[in-house]
Amino acid sequence: MVNYVSAKIALNKFVHRIEQNGALFHVHYWGGMPKHYNNLVHKHSFFEAHYVLDGNGFYLDDNKTYPLQANTLFLSRPEVLHQITSEEGITVVYVAFELVESESSEEWIKMIDGVKGSSQVVVNINEDTTVALLWKSLLLEATKLQQPFYEENLTTLSYSLISSLIQTFAPASLTSNQRSIPETSSVVLNQVKLYIRDNLTDSLKLKEVSKQFHISERHLSRLFVTQLGMNYSDFIQHERIQKAATLLKTTDLTIKDIAEESGFVSVHHFTRVFRAIMRNPPGRFRSLYTNLKKTSFTDY
């Protein structure tokens, strides 16, 4: 039997941000309880998916009550009041997540909106269904701390699980039309984003990058606006600032070297842009972070 405690500790430590195939998910927490009895009526601002492994109980959702048993899957939607009750206690695993819409494709946003409005919140499944096997595989993998590519495997499995959960509860009209998610455009955009992050020291002109991926400048520009909500140059500037902030916090490189590593043409330009976005010049940003590290987590 999987050690739920060690599995959820590992997942909470390593899997918070999942970015794949045109979607960015923020995971608030992972959970697992061998005996879950009752909780108060409450709501969240995010999704919370549950999988019952054993036991019996009831789930209250939006004033409707559903029976719970082994292999019941249920989804608490954002801003909907819900409650779990069980006299004998249920063995349950769960995950709380939300789609970061500003960094996800229109296809994913449409799918999530459909799930939010869906009337289907409880599904009884078989042990050998995809979502059940994925959840059990993820819990098992989470206990294998010494396995090669451990974090990468957890992230990939987590994406597959959350994607499967969403499609399980999405209206049939959406899943029948969205089987191709992610669409080719989302895949291309993801590849371009990875290319940009790996080549920030290059000029990364729109013309050069569009040629690299054999698409027109206009089409590439449109992908950034329609799927990320920002234009191409703004995305590059954002990535360069994020790279610079990471280097300021984690290295002793000079400001000049960090400007070069982040792809800025001069220290003056770097300082001006960094200050405008981060509200502090690079040197002060570094000192503030260093002081914070020194005053936090002491005597721990």
Image: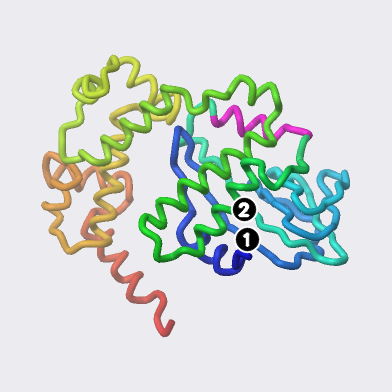
SS of the residue under disc 2 = strand
Could you tell me residue 154's position as x and y percent? 47, 53
Q: Amino acid at mark 2?
A: Val
Q: Dot 1 lies on which element?
A: strand
Q: Which residue is mark 1?
A: 31
Residue 297, position as x, y percentages in the image: 41, 76
Q: Are marks 2 and 1 in contact (CB under 8 Å)?
A: yes
| Image mark count | 2
Residue 118, located in which quarter of the rendered image?
top right
**Which SS type dominates the magenta stretch?**
helix
Instruction: Say what amino acid the circle numbered 1 marks.
Output: Gly
Examine the rendered structure and indicate whether residue 265 appears above or below residue 96. Answer: above
Q: Which residues are magenta?
A: 108-119
| C-alpha gap between disc 2 and disc 1 | 6 Å
Q: Is residue 183 left or right of residue 207?
A: right
Residue 207 is one of the magenta-drawn residues: no
Q: Residue at x 17, y 52 (%)?
A: 258
Query: In the rendered structure, does residue 118 fall within the stretch colored magenta?
Result: yes
Residue on which the image places disc 2: 95
